[in-house]
Image (cartoon, rainbow, N blue to C red):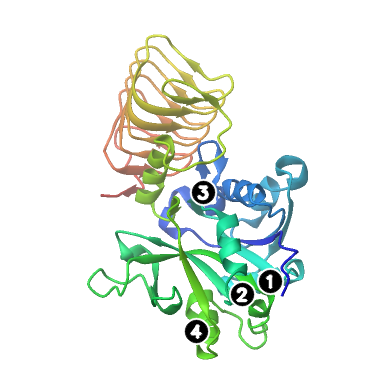
Amino acid sequence: MKHNNHNQAMILAAGVGSRLDPLTSQLPKPLCPILGKPVMEHIVYLCKKHGFTNLAANTHVMADKMKEHFADSNKKFGVNLNLVYEPQLTGVAGGIRSCKRFLTDDVILVIMSDALTDVDLTELYEAHINSDCAVTAAIKEVEDTTQYGVAVTDKNNRIISFQEKPKPEDAKSNLANTGIYFFNQSVINEIPSENEMLKFDVATDLFQKLMAKNIPIQAIKTKKYWADIGTLKQYLKSIKDTLEGKVSINILAEKTSYGYKGKSAVIDPSVKIEGRLYLGENVKIGSNVTLTGDIYIERNCTIESDSYINNSIVWPNSHIRKNVKIINSIIGNNCLVNEGIEIISNSVWAPDTVIKKDTKPSVVFG
């Protein structure tokens, strides 16, 4: 079988992202920012870099915001992106089915919208077409299996079973299923119609069906960076990893001695920086502010004088008044932190919060 046409990819973008609450109360998970761009936009650029420029994505949660961000994709990102609204969630394979009319190539790339990764899609594609497998799945060694679907492989790198988020003592492997797949067209045809079965997943339904028919599924271990940013803790860690250069992504900001500085960002000369920093466009940092550890401040934020920020994330349009302390926390968009406030460590604050003396954080994670 000649695989000469292969520039189509399906981006899974309908998920709820409940483990990122309260950040996702106003923003669908694929639009959560990573150094100035939504995580899904980084995926779009990754696809494009490897020659996948005909893209389809299913949307569900806050689909209007997705539509708004990804309008004019050709002009903005240089790809052809078709969004398909799903009125109800139908599982991962159901999502692929909803975009079927855009997925006509011999081989289709399927990739999550909410993973931060620089995985080598070209290498995976080549491994796929040089095998006799109908599916190739990228897998990644992980330390904590409780957050992932785990793949069990035999000595020929064929997947023999899956476990969903096993406890370490029950895990049959430490290989996370990244949700990055190459499917032959025949596999897409194995997804039942909506009338037959509305909700249909990949690992638990589609792959079980293929394994029952002895259709081989290949697993390729990736050494590249991959993280599902699905939890608050992992989101913080992924921002840290990005600032530390552990993942190669497209960052539109000036490279500086301390990290990255967006257009029109202003830092007072008296500011002390001891760590790595990303400042978005129009960020203003006042006198005698101290910034330590890994810090990510999104566009249009203001940090007034004498404040101290350590290992934290501040989402767009937030205002931090004088003499504030923020440690290991995430401030949502459009927040106002009153003067002199000390924010408790490991806290997350919902968008649009005015943080006064007795305001309680939305979430405390440890």
Question: Can you say whether 167 is above or below 33 in the image?
Answer: below
Whether the residues at callouts 1 and 3 have beta carbons within 8 Å, the answer is no
> Which quadrant holds the N terminus?
bottom right
First in sequence, mark 4 or 3: give its number. 3
First in sequence, mark 2 or 3: give its number. 2
Residue 311's spot in the image, x, y percent? 33, 34
Depth check, mark 2 against mark 4: the one in front is 4
- The residue type indicated by label 1 comes to Ser
Q: Nearer the viewer, residue 330 or 262?
A: 262
Residue ID for mark 4: 208
Residue ID for mark 1: 98
The residue at 68%/81% (across/down) is 189
Residue ID for mark 2: 94
Question: Can you say whether 307 is above or below 240 in the image?
Answer: above
Residue furthest to the left in view is: 169
Mark 2 crowd level (few <14, some 14–19, many ≥20, 10 Å Cα): many
The residue at 56%/52% (across/down) is 30
- The residue type indicated by label 2 comes to Gly
Mark 1 crowd level (few <14, some 14–19, many ≥20, 10 Å Cα): many
- The residue type indicated by label 4 comes to Gln
Disc 1 secondary structure class? helix
Residue ID for mark 3: 118
